[in-house]
Image: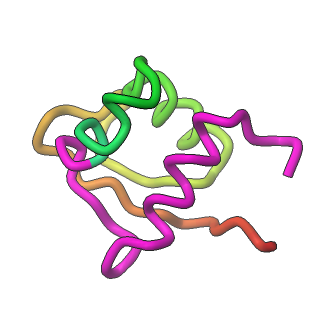
Amino acid sequence: MSELKEEERFIVELLQKAEGNKMNYKEIQTACENEFEGVRLILKNLKTKGFVSYEGIIPGFQSEIELVKAILE
């Protein structure tokens, strides 16, 4: 899927595997820490593209991130 960058795709796939397609921001940050930086900005971009949902403009440490648009293989 060309509309997603590699890091965005990583997070979407991570959420697709999560129970209920939801994860806490801290869990996502931990899963991505050895892969890349800038998780908040990537999540903000994914929200703009309609892939994830969370409260506010930028997710905080207690934010619950929900996948709203999955990647179809």
**Image quadrant assignment for residue 40:** top left
Who's the residue at 55% across and 55% down the image? 12
> Above or below — where is 72 with respect to 63?
below
> Above or below — where is 38 with respect to 55?
above
* Coloring scheme used: rainbow
As drawn, the residue found furthest toward the front would be 34
* Magenta: main secondary structure: helix
x, y percent for residue 56: 31, 36
x, y percent for residue 26: 17, 42
Where does the magenta region start and end?
1-27
Does the magenta run of residues contain 45? no
x, y percent for residue 35: 45, 30
Q: Is residue 48 left or right of residue 34?
A: right
> Above or below — where is 25 with respect to 33?
below
Q: How many marks?
A: 0
Q: Is residue 14 left or right of residue 60?
A: right
Return the residue nearer the eye: 26 or 57: 26
Q: Is residue 4 left or right of residue 18?
A: right
Does the magenta run of residues contain 23? yes
**Image quadrant assignment for residue 22:** bottom left
Q: Where's the C terminus, which quadrant?
A: bottom right
x, y percent for residue 36: 46, 24
Who's the residue at 36% across and 72% down the image? 18
> Above or below — where is 14 with respect to 17?
above
As drawn, the residue found furthest toward the bottom would be 20
